[in-house]
Amino acid sequence: VYRSGRDEVRLTVVRSYDAKALYHHPELAVTESTFVKTELRRFAQRPDVPVYVLSAESEGVALYALQYDNAFVQDPIRFQLRTAGELLFSGRRAMTLFFLTDDGPGAAIESLPSLGLFFEAIDRFSASAGASQ
């Protein structure tokens, strides 16, 4: 949890072998906020990372990205269908969920400092996961 004045940013990284538990409404497990809109976006800082942006009922926003086997997942349903056959011949691999909530006042997502924190967390986690293999 990061705090600055009224603004609170919560960063959560979860890794699991149960991919569906991570991609099927991850906000229900991570936060108590209610979100009314979800959209898939790509940002100039990391166009290779599909980011789901959730807009809260009140002020605030949440971002999440899914990573599996050193690649980012854009469509979880297609991902599940694609990997179903592969899993018959190989062991399961862990999926990683990067989830950030920013309760700050509504601003353009691109200008939020927490967006940089989100991508930095992804980069650091990916670097440490690569170093441990």
Image (cartoon, rainbow, N blue to C red):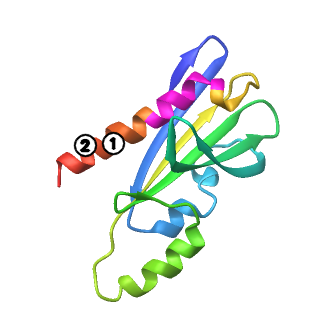
How far is mark 1 from mark 2, CA to CA? 5 Å
Which span of residues is magenta-colored?
111-119
**Vertical comparison of 64 with 90: above or below:** above
Count of marks overlaid on the render? 2
Q: Residue at x 55, y 18 (%)?
A: 3
Residue 128 has which mark?
2
Disc 1 crowd rating (10 Å Cα; few below 14, some 14-19, many 20+) is: some
Instruction: Give the image location of residue 67, x and y in percent.
Output: 43, 56
Q: Residue at x 78, y 30 (%)?
A: 59
Instruction: Give the image location of residue 109, x and y in percent.
Output: 67, 31
Residue 58 appears left or right of 104: right
Residue at image mark 1:
125
Residue type for callout 2: Ser
Q: Residue at x 59, y 73 (%)?
A: 77
The quarter of the image holding the C terminus is bottom left
Quadrant of residue 124 in the image? top left
Q: Residue at x 42, y 33 (%)?
A: 120
Residue 113 has which mark?
none
